[in-house]
Image: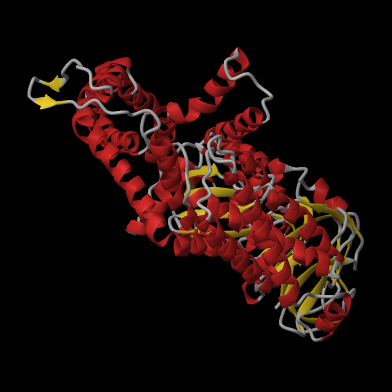
C-alpha cells in the first residue's frame, strides 16, 4: 500500500474521529481500538476501504484487519492520534467480565510481543548453532547471544510494567519503579540464597509483616496486579495532593503505598497464581492432552476471529517462565498455522480464478511464516470449505503433537521461523516430531481442501450475476479526476455520513445521469439532484461544496422532477469556472443515500482520471 497516511486518516474518520478513540495499538495483522461509542463506527464503510481485509467488534475492542502492512498503517494512525496512550473519553457501558478480561490481556500482551517473539526466535537460532557445532559455547559470541535471547524474559516485569501502565492509563515510570523493586538485587540474591538452603536476611514491613523472597524474574502476574493497584492509588493521591507540591510528593506517596503492598501481598499472590496456572495446564495436558491439543489445533482460527486466543498469551509466557518451555499451547498453534497454509495452497492449485490464485499464493506464503489472517479472511473463510479443511488438518496434527510430547523452547510466531525453537539438546526427536506435525497439518488440510472443493465466481457466473441484477452499476456523472473522499473539505461528505460517496474534481460543465431511472428531486438552489434507479438505487448528486449559497447561479437544469432518464442523459449544465471564481469548490459528489440496503458498494474505476459515463462503482445486493 502506497499511501498509509491517507488510509489512516480515512479509518480514524470512519471510526468516529479522534474523540471517539481512547486507546489504539496493533498486533501482527490488526489495528485494535478501545472506543467511547461503538455506534459511531461505520463498519461497513471500513470493510469496503481499500487496504482493509475486514473489521469486527471483539469484546470491548474494535479491530481492523490490515494484514502485512499493519505496522506501517499504525505508525500513521499513531501520529494522527498524537501518540495516543489512552484518551479522556470513557465508555458508558459496563464491561462484561469475559470481554473485559480479554481486552485487558490483549492490551497488555500485544505491545510486548515484538520483544518476546524476537528474543524467542533467537533462542531457536542459538539452539540450531549449537546442534551443528557452529558456535563455541564457552566463547564471548555465545554469551552475548544468550544475553540478548534471555533479556526480554528475564526482565519481563519491566516490559509488562510499561504495557500494563498504558493499558490501565497510569504513570508508566512509576510502574517501572515497582518492577525495579521486584528485580532489586536484595530480592534476587535473597531468593537464590533461600533456594540453595542458605540463610538470608529477614525482610519485614514494620517488623510485623514478613516479605518473602520470591523469584520475580520472568514473572507475569505480580507486576500486572501491582500496576492495576498503582492506577487507583496514584489517581487518589493526585486528586487530594495540593497542586503546588503534587509533582514532588504524589509519586513518593504513591510508591510508599503501592510497593509495600506489592511485596507483602500482591507479589506473593501473583507468584502463586502463576505457579498454580502452570501446574493446572500441565495436569490438563498430561491427562486429556490428546483432546485439548486437538481442540486448540482445530479451533484456533475461530479463537483468533473472536479474539479469545489472547487468553493463551499469559499461559504460554507463564509456562516459559516456570519451566523454560511450553508443551501445550505453542505446539498446537503451530499445527493450526500450517493447516491454514495447507488449505490455502490447496485453493491455489485448484482455483481457476486468476484473482483468487494470486491472493491464495501470497497469503499462503504469509501463513507459512506465521501470519494466517490474510489466508483466513482473504481465502478460506470466503470459500468456507477450505476453512473446514484447515480445522481438520489442525485438529489431527494437534493430537499428534500431544501424543509425541512436542515442546517449544523459544516463544515465536507459530510458523516456519518457529521451527528452530523446537530443538532440544537432550531430545533430538523433539524437532523431528515438530516438523512431521507441521507437514501432517499442511498435507491433510491441502488434501481435504482439494477433495471438498469450493464454489467460486468465474467470468461466466459474474456475467450471469450482472444479468440477474445482483450487481448494479453506477457511472461517472462527469469527466474529471477522482478526489480521495477524506480530503473533501465538508466533513459530512468526507465521513460519508449520508452514504457511500465518490468525489470527482470536474473537467467538464456537463453533469450526466449515472443510472437509468427517475429524477426525484432538484434542489431549489439547483446545486443537488436526487435520482432513483429502476432497481431502487438512490443517488444524490451534490454539485460543489457550500454552493447552496450561490442560490442557483452557475447551474442550469436540463431535466425536471419526475422525468425518466437513461444512463448518460444530460441533467445539468454547471459553470465550473464561474463557481471557482466565486470562491467555491466545484467537486461533484455521487452519494448512494440508501447504502445500507446493499451488502457492499465497491469502487471499480481503474485510475484517478475518469471519463463521463465510465463505470464508477457497483452496488451488490
User: In which quadrant will I find the C terminus?
Assistant: bottom right
Instruction: Measuring from the top left, give residue 260's x and y in whole percent.
Output: 20, 26
Is residue 52 visible from the viewing direction of this image?
Answer: yes
Q: Is residue 332 left or right of residue 337?
A: left
State which quadrant residue 465 falls in.
bottom right
Report the number of discs: 0
The residue lying at 71 percent from left, 62 percent from top is 443
Instruction: Measuring from the top left, give residue 270's x and y in whole percent.
Output: 28, 39
Give the answer, above or below, for where 535 lies relative to 371.
below
Give the answer, above or below, for where 42 lies relative to 558.
above
State which quadrant residue 132 falls in.
top right
The residue lying at 76 percent from left, 50 percent from top is 585
Q: Nearer the viewer, residue 37 or 302?
A: 302
The residue lying at 41 percent from left, 47 percent from top is 315
State which quadrant residue 492 falls in.
bottom right
Q: Is residue 213 left or right of residue 298?
A: left
Residue found farthest to the left: 208
Is residue 95 visible from the viewing direction of this image?
Answer: no
Instruction: Measuring from the top left, give residue 394's x and y in whole percent.
Output: 59, 62
Instruction: Measuring from the top left, give residue 450's x and y in whole percent.
Output: 75, 72
Q: Nearer the viewer, residue 569 or 611?
A: 611
Amino acid at each position: 500500500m502506497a499511501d498509509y497516511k491517507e488510509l489512516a486518516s480515512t479509518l480514524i474518520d470512519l471510526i468516529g474521529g479522534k474523540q471517539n478513540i481512547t486507546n489504539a495499538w496493533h498486533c501482527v495483522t490488526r489495528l485494535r481500538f478501545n472506543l467511547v461509542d461503538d455506534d459511531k463506527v461505520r463498519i461497513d464503510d471500513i470493510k469496503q476501504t481499500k487496504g482493509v481485509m475486514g473489521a469486527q467488534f471483539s469484546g470491548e475492542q474494535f479491530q481492523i484487519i490490515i494484514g502485512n502492512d499493519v505496522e506501517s498503517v499504525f505508525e500513521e494512525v499513531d501520529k494522527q492520534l498524537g501518540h495516543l496512550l489512552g484518551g479522556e473519553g470513557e465508555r458508558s457501558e459496563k464491561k462484561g467480565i469475559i470481554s473485559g478480561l480479554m481486552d485487558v490481556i490483549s492490551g497488555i500482551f500485544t505491545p510486548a510481543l515484538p520483544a518476546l517473539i524476537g528474543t524467542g526466535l533467537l533462542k531457536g537460532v542459538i539452539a540450531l548453532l549449537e546442534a551443528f557445532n557452529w558456535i563455541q559455547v564457552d566463547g564471548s559470541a555465545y554469551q552475548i547471544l544468550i544475553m540478548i535471547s534471555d533479556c526480554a524474559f528475564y526482565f519481563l516485569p519491566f516490559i509488562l510494567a510499561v504495557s500494563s501502565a498504558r493499558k490501565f492509563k497510569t504513570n508508566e515510570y512509576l510502574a517501572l519503579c515497582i518492577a525495579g523493586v521486584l528485580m532489586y538485587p536484595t530480592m534476587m540474591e535473597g531468593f537464590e540464597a533461600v533456594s540453595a538452603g542458605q540463610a538470608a536476611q529477614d525482610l519485614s514491613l514494620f517488623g510485623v509483616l514478613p516479605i518473602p523472597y520470591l523469584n520475580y524474574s520472568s514473572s507475569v502476574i505480580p507486576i500486572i496486579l501491582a500496576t492495576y493497584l498503582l492506577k487507583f492509588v496514584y489517581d487518589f493521591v493526585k486528586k487530594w495532593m495540593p497542586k503546588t507540591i503534587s509533582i514532588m510528593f504524589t509519586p513518593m506517596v504513591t510508591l510508599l503505598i503501592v510497593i509495600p503492598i506489592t511485596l507483602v501481598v500482591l507479589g506473593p499472590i501473583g507468584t502463586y497464581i502463576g505457579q498454580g496456572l502452570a501446574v493446572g495446564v500441565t495436569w490438563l495436558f498430561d491427562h486429556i492432552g490428546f483432546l485439548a491439543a486437538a481442540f486448540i489445533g482445530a479451533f484456533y482460527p475461530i479463537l483468533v476471529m473472536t479474539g479469545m486466543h489472547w487468553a493463551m498469551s499469559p499461559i504460554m509466557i507463564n509456562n516459559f517462565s516456570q519451566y523454560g518451555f511450553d508443551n501445550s499451547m505453542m505446539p498446537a498453534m503451530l499445527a493450526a498455522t500450517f493447516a491454514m497454509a495447507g488449505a490455502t495452497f490447496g485453493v491455489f492449485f485448484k482455483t481457476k480464478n486468476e484473482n483468487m490464485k494470486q491472493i491464495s499464493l501470497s497469503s499462503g506464503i504469509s501463513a507459512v511464516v506465521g501470519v494466517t489472517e490474510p489466508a483466513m479472511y482473504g481465502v478460506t473463510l470466503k470459500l468456507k470449505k477450505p476453512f473446514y479443511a484447515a480445522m481438520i488438518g489442525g485438529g489431527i496434527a494437534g493430537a499428534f503433537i500431544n501424543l509425541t510430547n512436542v515442546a517449544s523452547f523459544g516463544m515465536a510466531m507459530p510458523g516456519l521461523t518457529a521451527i528452530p525453537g523446537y530443538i532440544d539438546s537432550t531430545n533430538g526427536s523433539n524437532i523431528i516430531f515438530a516438523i512431521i506435525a507441521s507437514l501432517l497439518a499442511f498435507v491433510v488440510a491441502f488434501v481435504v481442501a482439494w477433495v471438498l472443493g469450493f464454489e467460486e465466481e468465474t467470468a461466466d457466473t459474474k456475467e450471469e450475476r450482472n444479468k440477474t441484477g445482483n450487481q448494479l452499476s453506477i457511472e461517472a456523472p462527469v469527466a474529471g479526476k477522482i478526489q480521495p473522499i477524506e480530503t473533501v473539505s465538508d466533513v459530512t461528505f468526507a465521513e460519508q455520513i449520508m452514504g457511500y460517496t465518490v468525489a470527482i474534481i470536474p473537467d467538464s460543465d456537463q453533469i450526466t445521469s449515472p443510472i437509468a431511472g427517475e429524477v426525484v428531486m432538484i434542489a431549489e438552489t439547483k446545486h443537488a439532484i436526487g435520482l432513483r434507479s429502476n432497481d431502487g438505487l438512490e443517488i444524490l448528486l451534490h454539485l460543489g461544496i457550500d454552493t447552496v449559497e450561490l442560490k442557483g447561479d452557475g447551474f442550469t437544469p436540463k431535466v425536471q422532477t419526475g422525468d425518466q432518464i437513461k444512463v448518460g442523459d444530460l441533467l445539468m449544465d454547471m459553470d465550473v469556472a464561474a463557481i471557482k471564481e466565486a470562491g467555491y469548490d466545484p467537486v461533484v459528489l455521487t452519494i448512494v443515500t440508501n447504502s445500507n440496503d446493499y451488502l457492499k458498494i465497491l469502487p471499480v474505476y481503474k485510475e484517478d482520471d475518469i471519463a463521463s459515463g465510465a463505470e464508477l462503482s457497483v452496488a451488490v445486493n
